Image (tube, rainbow, N blue to C red):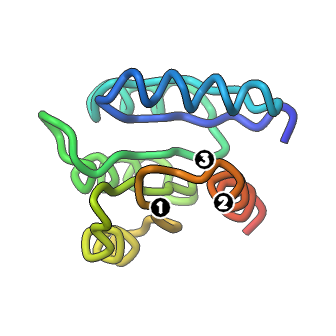
Amino acid sequence: MKGTRILLIDDETDFSETLAERLEIRGFETELASDGEKGIKLVKDKEFDVVILDLKMPGLSGIETLKSIKKIKKDLPVILLTGQGSTKDGEEGKKMGAHDYLIKPLKIDEFIEKVLGAIHK
């Protein structure tokens, strides 16, 4: 876990900041992007081990952001976040190259397990 670099792309800044804090306590390095465009720029400019991407965002949707990320770094694992039990969107994202998806609210232990699984795949 120590030194694992995670990019969180989510327009809900309170959620992202809280999740980043919880991850950093556990030794992860996190960077935040509040929308798809900023996230794509960070993927171009920096190295990450995994991207956590919200599906529902203003501007570029999570699916559009996922497509762009996969064009830039095909093998970079992306885990999608969906709300309100939206498994359909998560499954659609997996068909488009996402490693997996999680439903908000997150259980931190399940989340970390998915992150580590994506990195070590």
Q: Is residue 22 left or right of residue 11?
A: right
Horizontal and vertical percent for residue 52? 49, 45
- Return the residue at label 1: 102
Label 1 sits on a secondary structure element that is: strand
Where residue 110 is drawn, which disc sits there? 2
Label 2 sits on a secondary structure element that is: helix
Residue reaching furthest right? 2
- Between disc 3 and disc 1, the foreground one is 1
Where residue 50 is drawn, which disc sits there? 3
Q: Earlier in the sequence, mark 1 or mark 2?
A: 1
Distance from disc 3 to disc 1, alpha carbons, whole Å, reads 14 Å
Q: Residue at x 34, y 71 (%)?
A: 96
Label 3 sits on a secondary structure element that is: strand
Q: Earlier in the sequence, mark 3 or mark 2?
A: 3
Amino acid type, label 2 = Glu
Distance from disc 3 to disc 2, alpha carbons, whole Å, reads 15 Å
Amino acid type, label 3 = Val
- Callout 1 touching callout 2 (CB < 8 Å): yes
